[in-house]
Amino acid sequence: MIPYGRQDIQLADIDAVLEVLHSDFLTQGPMVPRFEQAVADKVGARHALAANSATSALHIACLALGLGECDWLWTTPITFVASANCGLYCGASVDFVDIDPRTYNLCPKALEAKLEQAEQEGRLPKVVVAVHLCGQPCDMAVIHALSQRYGFRIIEDASHAIGGKYRGNYIGSGHYSDITVFSFHPVKIITTAEGGMVLTNDGALASRMNLLRSHGVTRDPELMTHEADGPWYYQQIELGFNYRMTELQAALGVSQLERLDDYVSRRNALAERYDVLLAEFPVTTPWQHSNSYSGRHLYVIRLTLDAISLSHCQVFEALRAYGIGVNLHYIPVHTQPYYKQLGFQPGDFPEAERYYAEAISLPLYPTMSEDQQDQVVAALKAALELS
Ligand SMILES: *Cc1c(COP(=O)(O)O)cnc(C)c1O
């Protein structure tokens, strides 16, 4: 089986993790701050805080922005459920904005129209989570301008997008958002096994998220309500969590980060090669905005169902039968049973549902060979019954 994605672990990664195992600290040592500094320096953010997953990172990002009961969080329906669940964790309500049929990202025009209506109804969102699907950045300048007009905060869910650029700046530099979140799950661009990170240029938000990821406990005398009882003293001043990353994970992250640019350029080269190989196929290949450089986490094609005599599911199953580990990113979140029970219905976000009826993620990962890629293309040709 050629998988849709896979991590690349090299000897340097293994050595880095082993070194931590032999050291004094398995957690709360020097490697986590080193990883945080390395990512912050790489992408040009002032503050970076590692967490045990992007899901945890999204949770503390929402809390730091003050999201709570009676508030709304908006995101795209074409994302992993975590981009929406973080709002529910905080007791807020979640709503969605339909996708742009060209980029498959949250559509800025649909966002503007929905904001206009929400303003009249007095239910403007407090937070918008912009997901850079497949690594292609959302139109952040437009979303940022809307945030100024309507007073919401922006989290970039950049789980797919580390190493990519928007208008010449690395994703995570935070020019158009309050907080950016990365994921280091093994299928993502670089991995720490499980792991995530929040980045911000706002010192107050960073300090708040730092507390929330570790029980709301501080040893900083500046933050305490009174003078320390003694050298052992710490204070809990918030209700936080244990969302910390381990030293082993951070060491793996530091090592992986050194290959980030190579990974992303290899992903781009393979994606461009797919574009050429699939040019005559009855599929839509991923449109790319000229103002950005995608991390290319996923290569999603959309079947032109009118031009083929097979169903979406038949093509998908045929590819799996040929040993191609295709996948589908994503099932629209509002159609999940948990969200349906909150009142969402099929038909609520038609562009997202149309996308879901046609999309297939083809294998793409940096160690994929051209030979393997040719096998994927040959299997797709056979699956589509093209001669
Ligand atoms: C993977 C992913 C997440 C969750 O990441 P974890 O690190 O597994 O918690 C959130 N949002 C998106 C868009 C993702 O792809």
Image (cartoon, helix red, strand yellow):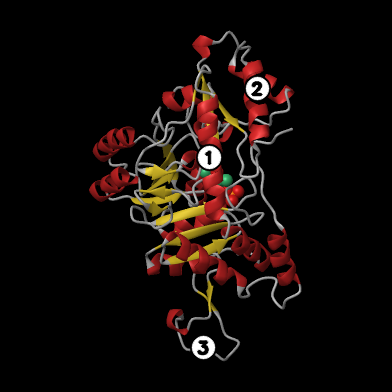
> For this view, does 75 lie left or right of residue 159?
left
> For this view, does 324 lie left or right of residue 209?
right
- How far apart, in angstroms, are the residues tagged by discs 2 and 3? 68 Å
Q: How far across and down, in percent of the image, does residue 129 sit?
A: 42, 46
Taking the spot 44% from the left edge, 66% from the top edge, the residue there is: 47
Residue under label 1, please give it.
Answer: 269
**Residue at disc 1, secondary structure:** helix
Q: Amino acid at mark 3?
A: Ala
- How far apart, in angstroms, are the residues tagged by discs 1 and 3? 57 Å
Q: Is residue 101 above or below residue 289?
A: above
Q: Which numbered marker is on residue 378?
A: 2
Q: How far across and down, in percent of the image, does residue 153 sit?
A: 35, 52
**Residue at disc 2, secondary structure:** helix
Taking the spot 73% from the left edge, 61% from the top edge, the residue there is: 14
Q: Earlier in the sequence, mark 1 or mark 2?
A: 1
Residue under label 3, please give it.
Answer: 228
Q: Is residue 46 above or below residue 6?
A: below
**Residue at disc 3, secondary structure:** loop
1 and 3 marks in contact (CB < 8 Å): no
Q: Earlier in the sequence, mark 1 or mark 3?
A: 3
Q: Earlier in the sequence, mark 2 or mark 3?
A: 3
- Give the quadrant of the C terminus: top right
Foreground mark, 1 or 3? 1
Q: Which numbered marker is on residue 30?
A: none
